[in-house]
Amino acid sequence: MKYSLILIAIACMFVGCGDDAVQPKPKAFLALEYPDPVYKKIDFPCSYSFEINDIAILKDGKVKQPCWVNIEYPLLDGTIFITYQPVHDNLKELLMDAQKLPLEHTVKADEIEGDTYINKKKRAYGTFYEVSGNAASQAQFYVTDSVNHFITGSIYFRSKPNYDSIVPAANYLKNDIKHLMESLTWKEDSLSSQLKEGILK
């Protein structure tokens, strides 16, 4: 009798758990929350300045070009890479190169959308490209005054592209890029100092 009760109890356990065992588990991703952005103006001896998020760090670009900088986000494990080119009768070529960059991600991208940015007061004109899918970069942009200055930028994460898992961080950085574009100003009096290398720590 004692052994019969034990066998019945074990059988009930298997029956009770059977339904749960065959149920497929839903696909889940880590829910990440980041602090509300607090922006501060970055002023350095280049022909442009802008505002960045307080959680970001501005560093020299790894490629030693004057006024190429990286905006690093340790908390998000990502970086916004900024390049600067002076315009010398080559605006058309610079525009073509900047517009080609998003197309390089079309193989793995699900969708690429471009939004035009125009600020006549600041003499800033450009385009913000938003990339969806497992592309290497989730957003790219360029801004120019059409006469002297040309800036490009792009987001990269230090991990294998998996859009579903990095989408919260990607969206956060996309908002920071938009703010960077809107806060960007040109500094005509610093044209000569942009030729100096190692200006950032």
Image (cartoon, helix red, strand yellow):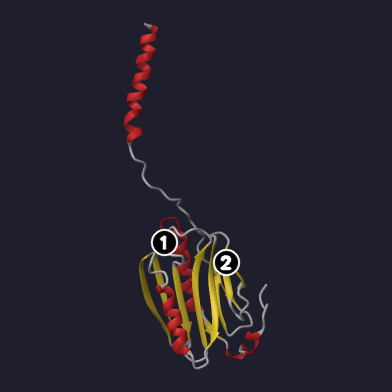
Q: Residue furthest bottom?
A: 89
> Where is residue 187 drawn, in percent x and y?
57, 87
- The answer to whether 172 is drawn above or below residue 15 in the figure is below
Quadrant for the N terminus in the image: top left
Which amino acid lies under the numbered mark 2 shown in the image of this protein? Glu
Circle 1 residue: 134
Q: Is there CB contact under 8 Å for labels 2 and 1?
A: no
Q: Amino acid at mark 1?
A: Asn
**Identity of the residue furthest to the top in this view:** 1
Residue 157 placement (x, y as % from top left): 51, 62
Label 1 crowd bin: few (<14), some (14–19), many (20+), radius 10 Å: some
Specify few, some or many for label 2: CA neighbours under 10 Å numbering under 14, 14-19, or 20 or more: many
Q: Quadrant of residue 75?
A: bottom right
* Disc 2 secondary structure class: strand
Q: As displayed, is residue 165 above or below residue 141?
A: above
The image quadrant of residue 61 is: bottom right
Rendered position, 166 above or below 201:
above
- The circle drawn on residue 72 is 2
Name the spot of residue 131 as percent of width and height, x first.
Answer: 40, 68
